[in-house]
Amino acid sequence: MNIEKAVEVIDRMRLPNGAYTASLSSDYHYVWIRDVVYTVLPFLATPSPYYEKAYQALLDLFIRYEWKIDIHTKKRPRYLYEYIHARYSTDLEELPQEWGHAQNDAIGAFLWGVGEGVHHGQKIIRSQKDLEIIQKLVDYLECLEYWQAEDNGMWEENMEVHASSVGACVAGLKAVRMLVHVEDGLIEKGEETLYKLLPRESAGKPTDLALLSLIYPYRIVSRDMALQILEDVTTTLERKYGVIRYVNDQYYNEGAEAEWCFGFPWLGLCFYELGMYDKANEYVEKTKSIITENWEIPELYIGGKYVPNGNKPLAWSVSLAYQFFKTMDVR
């Protein structure tokens, strides 16, 4: 299997400004902050223009909307459009459509990616202005009281306190505290929420695919908690073509929940993080089963029909599969 084809597919989704479109499909030809963070994970470990330019593009986006961030470092958003948006046009401009913009995990993910990137030698920071924006994003999360704030979560749906969102913020704040000022108490409050909420994703969801983020890439839960999350996800959510996001998910549900392709490599990466290499190796074969020859991995298999939906290639799917195969030294 030529895994370098994956890089060619990812390259096709890289925009002139350095960010990435979530997919080449018309429905997903947008830029999501979260998707960019996951798309460039394969380029994190060694200094990479792809990684650096992606984060600089997002910094430029935040600089463009600095006026909005300034407001909401002091005044909590009341309406969804007031939140820092999670989805943008390919020119990195806000879109007018009503959307689940309250996605605190996207801001946490961005901060984590900046801090981790700098730690790995990525030259993301260009000027004092970049550091000022990062500080304002920290202040934004504090103003939101992220540790007890209901948000739309990773899947952009109902407003609840989501463990995956709180965890992303905790990871992000930890990652940037060497770059900007982060009060210790700001991290501790998030950790207290996780202690009370986990292994649940939220009051309404006993488990969720999004919880894998707390193991990989964020690495912020104990081994025992990671094992519990993995047990819940594999026994409750794993299916033939991937992993459902949560029980009774209605997105692309035509008789059953949709099966998300990136669930397999994501589980594999989580088991690898825990040193469970034999278990991780099981997911090599499962991941191969959903990879086409051209590496145009779709978002999901439609529930009940078990055929791919039109959102392919999905940058996040291709990236996680490629990262997993690189980690496992699959040729």
Image: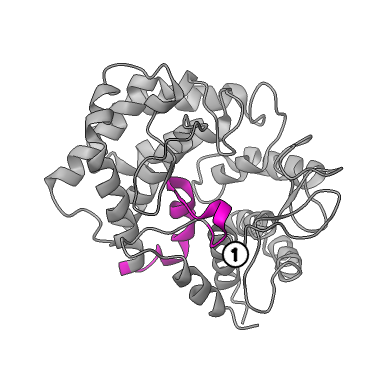
Of residues 292 and 207, which is closer to you in this image?
A: 292
Tell me the residue at 62%/70% (across/down).
296
- Disc 1 residue crowd, few under 14, some 14–19, many 20+, Cα 10 Å: many
Tell me, yes or no, if residue 47 can be seen here.
no
Q: Amino acid at mark 1?
A: Pro
Q: Which residue is label 1 attached to?
A: 313
Tell me the residue at 48%/27% (across/down).
191
Tell me the residue at 43%/61% (across/down).
40
**Total tally of numbered discs in the picture:** 1
For the N terminus, the image quarter is: bottom right
Q: Quadrant of residue 189?
A: top left
Tell me, yes or no, if residue 163 can be seen here.
yes
* Start-end of magenta stretch: 23-49
Tell me the residue at 55%/42% (across/down).
214
Q: Is residue 246 left or right of residue 187?
A: right
Q: Is residue 234 left or right of residue 56?
A: right
Q: Is residue 107 magenta?
A: no
Q: Quadrant of residue 173?
A: top left
Horizontal and vertical percent position of residue 143 = 33, 20
Horizontal and vertical percent position of residue 76 = 35, 17
Horizontal and vertical percent position of residue 172 = 39, 40
Q: Quadrant of residue 291?
A: bottom right
